[in-house]
Structure formats: structure tokens, C-alpha cells
């Protein structure tokens, strides 16, 4: 669901509720970008989310909002 202008402006102003909505809106894309595959000891491949990368992307998103 797209974000409305009011939410974007509130997020740019630092409102916590709006920041949560922005992160929620982009969480699927962030998770997709942070997905990595790892080979398991039994030879199978497992897709996991790199949490460090995920937190880094969320931080960059929050830092860029005031310039929006």
C-alpha cells in the first residue's frame, strides 16, 4: 500500500508513528535485498535474512527521510 503525503511529511519531521509506517511499507523490499543463501551442513541451501544489512538499510532509509 502506498504512503500518503501526510505520513511522508510526518516521517520527514521525525514522528515515530510515521517512521514505523514507512519502515513497514518498505519492509518487504528491504527483506528481499537482505536475503542471502547459506549452505547447510547436510548440503541443503537455506535462505536467511542478514540482520546487520537489514538494520543498515533501515537506518539509511530513516536518515534519508528529512531530505525527501
Image (tube, rainbow, N blue to C red):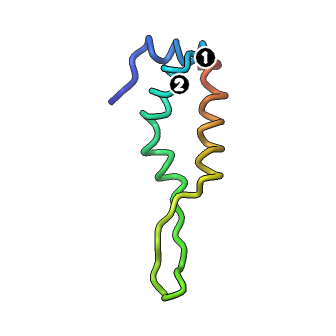
Q: Which residue is mark 2?
A: 19
The 10 Å Cα crowd at callout 2, few under 14, some 14 to 19, many 20 or more, is many
The answer to which of marks 1 and 2 sits earlier in the sequence is 1
The quadrant where residue 21 appears:
top left
Secondary structure under the numbered disc 2 in the rendered image: helix
Farthest residue, direction left: 1
Residue in the image at 46% along x and 41% along y:
27
User: Where residue 63 sits: x, y (%)?
Assistant: 67, 28
User: Where residue 16 sits: x, y (%)?
Assistant: 55, 20
Residue in the image at 58% along x and 48% along y:
54
Secondary structure under the numbered disc 1 in the rendered image: loop
Q: Which residue is mark 1?
A: 14
Q: Is residue 45 above or below residue 65?
A: below
Residue in the image at 51% along x and 45% along y:
30
Q: Is residue 35 above or below residue 28?
A: below
Which image quarter is the N terminus in? top left
Q: Give the spatial CA distance, label 1 vs label 2.
A: 7 Å
Which label sits on residue 59? none
- Label 1 close to label 2 by CB (< 8 Å): yes
Which image quarter is the C terminus in? top right
Farthest residue, direction bottom: 42
The 10 Å Cα crowd at callout 1, few under 14, some 14 to 19, many 20 or more, is some
User: Where residue 38 sits: x, y (%)?
Assistant: 54, 73
Residue in the image at 63% along x and 18% along y:
66
Count numbered badges in the picture: 2
User: Where residue 40 sits: x, y (%)?
Assistant: 52, 81
Amino acid at each position: 500500500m502506498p504512503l500518503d503525503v501526510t505520513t511522508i511529511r510526518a516521517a520527514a519531521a521525525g514522528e515515530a508513528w510515521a517512521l514505523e509506517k514507512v519502515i513497514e511499507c518498505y519492509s518487504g523490499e528491504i527483506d528481499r535485498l537482505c536475503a542471502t543463501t547459506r549452505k547447510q551442513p547436510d548440503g541443503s541451501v537455506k535462505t536467511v535474512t542478514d540482520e546487520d544489512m537489514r538494520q543498515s538499510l533501515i537506518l539509511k532509509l530513516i536518515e534519508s527521510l528529512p531530505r525527501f
